[in-house]
Amino acid sequence: MKVAFFVLYWVLCAVVCTAMIFVALSVLAPLHGPNAASLAMPVVSDAPVAGSYTEVVATGFRVVNKVAYQFEPSQATRDLAVRHIGAAGDTPRIWYDYVPAPDTRKMPLIILLHGANRDGLSMIEMWRQTAAKYQLALVAPSSVGKTWDFDRPDPQFLVDLVAEMAGKYDIDPDQILLFGHSDGATYAEWLLNRTSGPWRAAVLHGGFAPADWLKPPLVAKPVRLYLGDRDAGNPLATARAVGQALARMGHQSEIVVIPGHDHWFYDIGPQIAEDSWQWLMRLPKPH
């Protein structure tokens, strides 16, 4: 009975969050922020050069069947991550970063976008082991409200965070990745398709943007989605339609289907982080 209750609870949460995102994106406002116009991705007016669509089933992930869906960041992550308080214009903002002891190499930077009712620290927890292993810098903003503001998206804030990290650490400008879970995945895909930020690619887990507001971008960057075949709020058929639409618009679009996995990120997350980084390393180097 408890298992059925928790499964129903998370299914309802996923459905409600997805519905809210679709409503918000249907009336998506222009980019927000002082330099918003310069960040808008130019749209290709002619027929875009087609990209590619790939779908694979990955059986190598360890999937945990939960009885209770509960998660809090560990004390180790709380001790290692640095919490920042600042502002974007008049809006107070909070973000976290984690940077392992740097060596002489330029460091890749991963921008982590959390799901609804979470914060940046939850994403640091999922990526901390991979960051330490491969010398990656992490920056994880928290949304202003319970989730990302799709009515007033502010990519400039993320660009400013990248600049701040680059001012403190030797960041490799060709190795900046967007990673998002759930609502954060929707935001990451929107950022990749509709803005010309410094991000090289995007990786998503358990979320994606509606196909009908994507545009053929002047620069189509790679995107990969990890999706459980038991994620009731994000049907594979819909994800496939979005992935194929992205390919028609020029993106290299991939879906990794995980058998037996649902929407829950906070057990499989470190595995997804490691696999995401390996994927980025296999991408062709930018010219």
Image (cartoon, grey):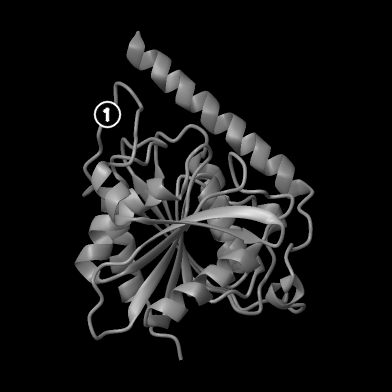
Q: Where on the picture, by quarter, is residue 264?
A: top left
**Rendered residue at 59%/35% (across/down):** 17
Q: Position of residue 193 (x, y in %)?
A: 61, 66
One can see residue 208 in this view: no
Query: Is residue 256 something that shows in the picture?
Result: yes
Taking the image as shown, residue 241 lies to the left or right of residue 81, namely right
x and y percentages locating residue 183 in the rendered image: 55, 45
Q: Name the spot of residue 168 as percent of width and height, x first.
A: 41, 77
Residue at x 34% of width, y 11% of height: 2
Q: In front: 188, or 166? A: 166
Q: Is residue 137 left or right of residue 47?
A: left
Residue 255 falls in image quadrant? bottom left
Residue under numbered circle 1: 65
Viewer-nearest residue: 239 or 194:
194
Q: Amino acid at mark 1?
A: Asn
Q: Residue at x 46, y 26 (%)?
A: 10
